[in-house]
């Protein structure tokens, strides 16, 4: 169908990998159901995506019955500024320059003959919701964390009767509707007084200020995974689970465009050369950087496990080196591969992967669940700790490395956890649970499944309002 005849949705992503991926997946999913979808983020994210994807993020791509295109906006940002990775500065720039840039972008779409009829944004960009509703455009949110974490933040911001612990040492644990009891170590760390990332606490609180303006709060989760939590929120905030978005795309696309901000190393061939269920995949996502001492303990633990491994190690911002000890690279070259970035979704589906040693970012958690891969959870901060609690104790797919936040996880503990998930007495049970979630995820996104029905309702609503 002609571009101008399709209802047009603008989706806006906060410029970090953990937000770009689910928002881009949502864009593809909506396009596959017959909408014109423009994916948008900052110019810096656009530059990185184009570089990583051989410029694919600059073309118009037909997907299923619809189409996808890209528009990046300036947040007035000097890439040569040595502080350009500073989060506080980024948030300030976005808040100052984002609203006008977004309003201009929306105006331009109308002038070019494809008026925007709906905006779906990240809660990390609360002003985008205001820009859309001020322009009289329907708006929605995509919550990119779990419903459990939504509940924890929601009550933190709206319910003064619930007491939250101030520190990890606190005796207070938190009971929230539909959730297991959370100890201080299971509560998103941005809620503790000891949290050093104050700007993130502000962002989290701000997310709820104008949430009522959203026609829907879509969530990257699925009903069967978090039912008691979603049901307990009814009447307070109504969440519409539409995930796992990655799983929902496996039938409609053959990698139309990936959302990577860095170029992936070629590791699939290396995985092909290994036995099924023999490789530990290790990755702590796009933001976590371990200090030298912890990195060394991890290296020892991985080496001592005796397992084959694929390890994604990100250099610290503005550095080129991974910081991995030389001895490790030399001594494990025969049975391991270290890369700066990989196509994680493909890696997790590879038959040679036995388990995922993960920081438990929500995308990584969902990708693991929908690929049937058990996990060793090694959360560092934020929502990761809550996700780790759920992966181990509620979803039953793994174990959590024992290390109090901020303290060291020993090499023995790293080795013990890998051995437990790969070959320990509970390994089979964890794999069985992981396979159960994989099937449930596939069902949720298949035609008529719980997530598919929810996203179809959104698409129908958008089409009807645009008609
Ligand atoms: N990812 C990837 N390649 C890597 C490491 C991570 O493609 O080498 C992707 C991963 O699949 C996920 C995202 O990056 O979609 C990371 O998001 P997550 O929420 O897990 O963690 P964050 O990076 O936000 O801490």
Image: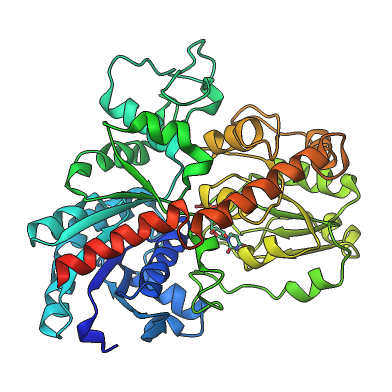
* Residue located at (82% from left, 72% from top): 272
Question: In this image, 399 relative to 62: left or right?
Answer: right
Q: Position of residue 88 (x, y in %)?
A: 33, 48
Snapshot quadrant of residue 205: top left
Quadrant of the frame with the C terminus = bottom left
Snapshot quadrant of residue 163: top left
Q: Position of residue 68 (x, y in %)?
A: 36, 78
Picture layout, residue 288 above or below residue 169: below
Quadrant of the frame with the N terminus = bottom left
* Residue located at (28% from left, 36% from top): 237
Q: Position of residue 464 (x, y in %)?
A: 18, 67
Q: Position of residue 12 (x, y in %)?
A: 30, 63
Snapshot quadrant of residue 403: top right
* Residue located at (47% from left, 63% from top): 447
**Which residue is at the front of the view, 123 or 43?**
123
Question: In this image, 316 relative to 306: left or right?
Answer: left
Quadrant hosting ligand 1? bottom right
**Which residue is at the front of the view, 270 or 90?**
270
Farthest-out residue, front: 448
Question: In this image, 223 relative to 279: left or right?
Answer: left
**Residue 369, can we see it?**
no
Picture layout, residue 220 above or below residue 385: below
* Residue located at (21% from left, 49% from top): 214
Figure label count: 0
Question: In this image, 222 relative to 38: left or right?
Answer: right
Farthest-out residue, bottom: 2
Indicate the colouring scheme: rainbow
């Amino acid at each position: 169908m002609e571009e101008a005849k399709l209802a047009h949705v603008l989706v806006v992503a906060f410029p970090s990998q953990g937000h770009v991926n689910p928002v881009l997946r949502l864009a593809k999913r909506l396009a596959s159901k017959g909408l014109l979808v423009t994916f948008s983020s900052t110019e810096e994210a656009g530059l990185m995506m184009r570089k990583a994807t051989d410029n694919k993020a600059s073309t118009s791509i037909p997907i299923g019955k619809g189409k996808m295109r890209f528009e990046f906006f300036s947040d007035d940002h000097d890439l040569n500024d040595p502080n350009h990775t500073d989060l506080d500065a980024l948030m300030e720039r976005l808040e100052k320059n984002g609203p006008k840039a977004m309003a201009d972008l929306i105006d331009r779409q109308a002038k070019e003959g494809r008026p925007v009829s709906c905006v779906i944004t990240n809660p990390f960009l609360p002003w985008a919701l205001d820009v859309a509703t001020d322009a009289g455009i329907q708006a929605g949110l995509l919550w990119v964390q779990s419903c459990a974490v939504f509940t924890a933040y929601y009550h933190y911001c709206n319910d003064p009767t619930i007491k939250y612990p101030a520190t990890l040492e606190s005796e207070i644990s938190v009971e929230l509707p539909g959730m297991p009891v959370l100890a201080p170590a299971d509560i998103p760390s941005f809620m503790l007084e000891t949290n050093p990332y104050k700007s993130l606490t502000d962002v989290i609180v701000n997310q709820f200020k104008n949430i009522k303006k959203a026609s829907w709060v879509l969530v990257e989760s699925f009903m069967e995974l978090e039912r008691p939590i979603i049901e307990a929120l009814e009447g307070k905030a109504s969440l519409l689970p539409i995930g796992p978005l990655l799983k929902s795309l496996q039938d409609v696309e053959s990698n139309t465009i990936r959302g990577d901000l860095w170029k992936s190393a070629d590791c699939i061939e290396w995985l092909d050369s290994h036995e099924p269920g023999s490789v530990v995949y290790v990755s702590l996502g796009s933001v976590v950087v371990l200090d030298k001492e912890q990195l060394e303990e991890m290296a020892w633990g991985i080496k001592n496990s005796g397992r084959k491994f694929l390890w994604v190690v990100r250099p610290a911002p503005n550095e080129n080196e991974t910081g991995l000890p030389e001895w490790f690279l030399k001594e494990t070259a025969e049975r391991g591969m270290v890369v700066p970035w990989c196509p994680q979704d493909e890696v997790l589906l590879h038959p040679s992967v036995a388990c995922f040693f993960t920081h438990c970012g929500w995308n990584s958690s969902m990708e693991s669940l929908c690929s049937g891969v058990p996990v060793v959870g090694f959360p560092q901060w934020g929502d990761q700790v809550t996700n780790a609690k759920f992966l181990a104790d509620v979803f039953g797919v793994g174990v959590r490395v024992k290390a109090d936040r901020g303290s060291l996880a020993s090499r023995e503990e790293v080795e013990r956890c890998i051995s437990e998930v790969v070959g320990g007495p509970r390994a089979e049970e964890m794999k069985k649970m992981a396979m159960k979630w994989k099937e449930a995820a596939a069902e949720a996104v298949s035609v008529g499944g719980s997530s598919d029905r929810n996203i179809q309702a959104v698409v129908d609503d958008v089409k009807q309002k645009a008609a």
